[in-house]
Amino acid sequence: MLTDLPTVKQTAVYVYQTPVRIWHWVNALSITVLAITGYLIGSPLPTLPGEASDHYLMGNIRFFHFAAAYFFMVGFIFRIYWAIVGNSYSHQLFTLPFWRKRFWSELVHEVRWYAFLEKEPRKYIGHNPLAHLFMVVIITVGGLVMIVTGMALYSEQTGLGSWQDDLFGWVIPFVGQSQDVRMWHHWGMWVIVVFVMLHVYTAIREDIMSRQSLISTMISGWRMFKDDRP
Ligand code: HEM
Ligand code: HEM
């Protein structure tokens, strides 16, 4: 006996491999830069005195948006590659087991747990079903929408004949016109911002209230279970 304080036996599973963790934090940083600079592109700061080309304020804001966009896009492609070669939990971001009845019953349980209607949290090695569903819909599908609409807007600037125009130019007439694409791109930002707020709240809440570690898991890769009950 090391102490007379209450003790529990913990178990740990290595869930998030190094590339997934690096991707998570690089992706979080690039989305933060994209949301701030994107907001400033949509609602520009007051005009500064002097020649715009001298202070180049909007130019710099746009440069940071495009630089972060490339980090986001290369990261997205890399994450697809890692879902193919990584461990079984690395697939979760791109797959939803919607044909499994258990997934849906656990999803209902998680909604009730988050709403403080359940007393006993369940154990999950990977994402819980509610987190899983939101990550696939908002980050995978939503991220793809942001890439396609963002590249379509970008192709207007790189011009006819550019690879951006060859690959994404069709999106503008498909959606309607340039301003419609801009509107969807802008709305996408708010959807992602709301996701990030809920995500950070639930990560902290679950770290405290659930039966497993959360934030340290996305840092070290190891999921610690706070008790050895099934
Ligand atoms: C999470 C990802 C992203 C977020 C949150 C985001 C957000 C935004 C927002 C809010 C705007 C302003 C729209 C408006 O005029 O109201 C914008 C503009 C723009 N974004 Fe993004 N964006 C993201 C990803 C991308 C990507 C991947 C690209 C690809 C290159 C991109 C390219 C652009 C372009 C070209 C513009 C228009 C710039 C201008 O008209 O000066 N964005 N973005
Ligand atoms: C822009 C900000 C962020 C975005 C877009 C984001 C997105 C994501 C995504 C997509 C995953 C799934 C990872 C995968 O399966 O590959 C994830 C997991 C996770 N994120 Fe974030 N994240 C952000 C910020 C944060 C922050 C600030 C924290 C810490 C407070 C955090 C904590 C976590 C944790 C703990 C997990 C693992 C959840 C689990 O164990 O089931 N995230 N995040």
Image (cartoon, helix red, strand yellow):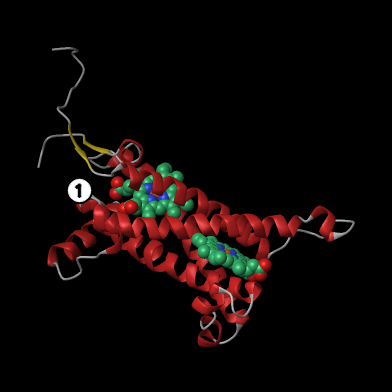
Note whether ligand 2 is within 8 Å of mark 1: yes
Extreme-left residue of the structure: 230
Residue at image mark 1: 124
Q: Classify 72 as above or below 200.
A: below
28 on left or right of 82: right
Residue at image point 90% right, 57% down? 50
Which residue is at a point 17% across and 30% down the rendered structure image? 10
State which quadrant residue 164 falls in.
Answer: bottom right
The quarter of the image holding the N terminus is top left
Residue 115 visible in the shown view: no
Number of other residues with Cα within 10 Å of mark 1, as a class: few under 14, some 14 to 19, many 20 or more: few
- Determine whether the residue tagged by mark 1 lies in a helix, strand or loop: loop
Q: Name the side, left or right, on which 45 lies relative to 132.
A: right
Residue at image position (60%, 85%) is 177
Image coords of residue 182 (percent x, y): 59, 74
Q: Is residue 158 above or below residue 130?
A: below
Does 185 appear above or below 172? above
Q: Is residue 88 above or below residue 166?
A: above
* Quarter of the rendering occupied by the C terminus: top left
Q: Is residue 230 visible?
A: yes
